[in-house]
Amino acid sequence: MLKKSVALAAASLMMASVAGTTLAAGRDYISIVGSSTVYPFATTVAEQFGKTSRFKTPKIESTGSGGGMKLFCAGIGVKTPDVTNSSRRIKKSEYQKCQANGVTDIVEMKIGYDGIVVANSKKTAQLELSRKDLFLALAKDVPDPKGGEKLVANPYTTWKEVNPALPATPIEVLGPPPTSGTRDAFVELAMEGGCKQFPFIKAMKKKDKKAYKGICHTVREDGAYIEAGENDNLIVQKLEANPQALGIFGFSFLDQNSDKIQGSRVDGTNPTFEEIADGSYPVSRPLYFYVKKAHVGVIPGIAEYLAEFSNDRAWGEDGYLADKGLIPAPVEERRQFARAAKELTPLVMD
Amino acid sequence: MTRQNKSTMEMVQRGLARRHRREKIFRFLGMAAVTTSILFLLLLFGSIIANGWSAFRQAELSLEVSFDQELLDVDNLRDANYALLIKRSLREFFPQVEKRRDLRHLYKLVSSGAAFELQAMVMADPSLIGTRRLVTLPADDEVDMLLKGYIPRDVPESERRVSDQQIRWIDELVAASRLKLGWNTTFFTAGDSREPELSGIRGAVAGSLFTLLVTLLLSFPIGVAAAVYLEEFAPSNRWTDCIEVNINNLAAVPSIVFGLLGLAVFLNVLGMPRSAPLVGGLVLTLMTLPTIIIASRASLKSVPPSIREAALGIGASRMETISHHVLPLAMPGMLTGTIIGMAQALGETAPLLMIGMVAFIVDVPGGLTDPATVLPVQIYLWADSPERAFVERTSAAIMVLLTFLIMMNGTAVFLRKKFEQRW
């Protein structure tokens, strides 16, 4: 027994030394990090790229948009990722951090759009919501229902109280937690969109931007909005079990489960592929990824990966990403970013 | 005297019914607790198996493919248009389909990976060129879901992902026994994929094995050495007390903390690669060490002092006493502790998140520094995928993980039963 453990110890020592030598070697695959919303699309392209090209399949970590940017902007070199996916545009502060760390040339790619849907079970009727309804139902503080320019803690408990045209069911919305990009986008597009329909709140934007954001972006915490975790499949299952509840998630989950759930109409538009694509559905956001120009040519395959992504076979109207639920960008935009991908035009932010 | 005795007996008699009742209630509560946990376990296993067993079968299409010479250039087999071979074969089977749009829907019945399978087939055996044969190819996951009954046929066409027309084609193929459910080999031979029908757990299993190998090779010798020193050699003073308290504390530290430590030390300071099983193994070593040390010390303690005294008495050195007598007797307990620690490490995801092992990795890892993921991470990633076919695959992967865990814990029980000594 002792001999065995001595042998094991020797083996582990040897292994540690082997590990030490292999670390110095470069990387022969693309390393991608970032948004969990872009993840299903990026992985599809990566897999296709790995199969059709002579390069290895890129490795994709789902770290969230913010986490991805942090890793991406940490510097240049094989230890840092080559690409980061993002469900929002790069922030100025992140851009500056990148610049400060030597990541000077960043190529920006907009890959398409993602609709955020508010859905419920097919067992109940489809809801006809407006962004104002969503704001009134989900914000922490809302304008006093009795009138005036005063804010009160959200008093609404049923949809009917929010808008007499809606059913008298309790407000119960399952949605993502604050760490999620989907939540950020929902708050920004749906709630803020409804929030600024109140003239006195809109007027605040110029005077006190912080207070304005505080009102429009704060979700109520009294149990009407239920943080259901990052797993959208779970929300879909819960909606089936509880037909009164509404759920907030990405369009691709609605697309895959259209026999069980239906998307509510928002401001008179349906969350369908067509209406999100033509821009009439208001709660949709662009998706991006960012590439380190300095790594192109150093890590094999980056230029080819860009070419695969920016091909109409992938992100076009009939491309394989549309099958996965990505809403393609308009032709003009696609052409512009495909050119940027080819010429590696760096992003300039002042 | 007798009076007093009688009154004591009376007192005992009086209280006896109550005491018996109490005992009954206590036993009943205990049994109820055991039954409840067994019921929950059965519920868990039941739901996982009910959800997952169908993933071991997979819809396959048998198509008659003619490997045309004009399409397949022997010198450039890689870039030939294999998808066209499949399209031609489908058109042969459904000659009435002519419109471009309908054809596209028809082609969608076959998995997008089918062309790559043909490619691999022809490249492995170029003598196929010019022949015509029946080839089994994976069907699309929507077809698979329909055949398994997960896509309802009775809802309006717009509410399901398979159109009425496609259902007609599928039924026709089934009637001609060209489309059927077969054993899902891909699930065990492929790495991860975004197409459910092409995804498998081999990459995750290989990653788990590499990670656990590193963990075992490091944590077992270090853990046993630490335990032997602390138990047999170390003087008992404030320092060793302090070490003991710290080891017990470490055993209770949440595993994500070890992940953060791994990120700071192994990745940032030592510059090891992200997502590598080597780093995962190191982090899990940190996590399992306290478990192994504590179990090993307990089993060293249970070796009776008479054994040590006898060995020392006939002139053995302390080193010889330990290596010839104490260690072999304590080994079963140490191995049990190690296996339980390994089983714990096998199910861990939180510390791996920080070091980049929660990632989409298609290629099956071939070494300790290749990017890899592990079984529980694969389960997490599939559970989060929108495609419905991943639901059953999630459960199937859980079944595989549970099998490994049961095997490991079974080995621990077996070792204990076989080598355990009673004094």
Image (tube, grey):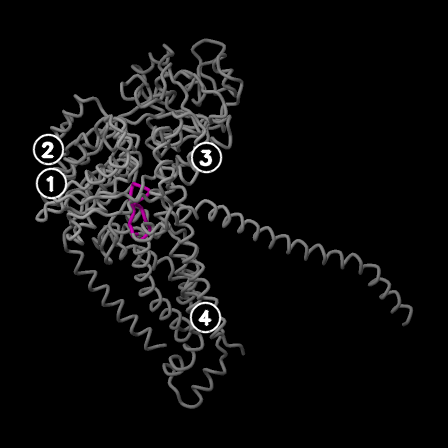
Q: Is residue B167 magenta?
A: no
B279 relative to A257, above or below: below
**Which comes sooner in the sequence, label 2 or label 3?**
3
Q: Chain for mark 2?
A: A
Q: How many residues crowd mark 4 within 10 Å: few (<14), some (14–19), many (20+)? A: some
Circle 2 sits on which residue?
A344
Mark 4 residue element: helix
- Please name the amino acid that badge 4 sits on: Leu
**Which stretch appears magenta?**
B190-203
Disc sitting over residue A237 in the figure:
3
Circle 4 sits on which residue?
B415
Q: Residue at horizontal 30%, vertical 50%?
A: B373
- Please name the amino acid that badge 2 sits on: Leu
Question: Majority secondary structure of the magenta segment?
Answer: loop
Mark 3 residue element: helix
Circle 1 sits on which residue?
A296
